[in-house]
Image (cartoon, grey):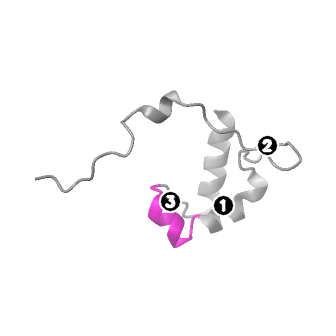
Amino acid sequence: MSLSPAPVIPAGTPCHSAQPTLVSPDGGPLSRPWTAAEAEVVHGAYQDAGIQRWTLRRMGSRDEVLQWIAAGERQ
């Protein structure tokens, strides 16, 4: 007997759906990559217990955040 619930939607279904587009009230992008100027904010956010609960990434220092942001910029 399995204690796992049945899936709500079949596996793989979301990958065939259009992804949402998020825009701000002025029509600009609502989401954008982090910048080095925001490293302190990102570091502080990653210290939050709620974020730590739902993500595997850890940001132990501002330097780690800067390296992560720079890696994203290179990609």
Q: Could you tell me which residue is drawn at 61 percent across and 35 percent down? A: 19
Q: Are marks 3 and 2 in contact (CB under 8 Å)?
A: no
Q: Could you tell me which residue is drawn at 74 percent across and 52 percent down? A: 36
Q: Say which label, 3 or 1, has the lower sequence index.
A: 1
Q: Residue furthest right?
A: 26
Q: Say which label, 3 or 2, has the lower sequence index.
A: 2
Instruction: Check if residue 31 falls in the magenta segment.
Output: no
Could you say where residue 25 lies in the image, as x and y percent from the top left? 85, 50
Q: Residue furthest top?
A: 16
Secondary structure category for the residue under label 2: loop
Tell me: 57 left or right of 69: left
Q: Say which label, 1 or 2, has the lower sequence index.
A: 2
Secondary structure category for the residue under label 3: loop
In this view, 34 is above or below 46: above
- Name the amino acid, label 2: Pro
Q: Nearer the viewer, mark 3 or mark 2?
A: 2
Could you say where residue 47 lies in the image, as x and y percent from the top left? 56, 69
Which region of the structure is painted magenta?
Answer: 46-56
- Find the distance from the CA under tag 3 to the CA under tag 1: 11 Å
Q: Which residue is mark 1?
A: 42
Q: Nearer the viewer, residue 42 or 18?
A: 18
Secondary structure category for the residue under label 1: helix
Residue 58: image tag: 3
Quarter of the image where the C terminus is located: top right
Q: Are marks 1 and 2 in contact (CB under 8 Å)?
A: no
Instruction: Check if residue 51 falls in the magenta segment.
Output: yes
- Name the amino acid, label 3: Arg
In this view, 22 is above or below 51: above
Q: Which residue is mark 2?
A: 29
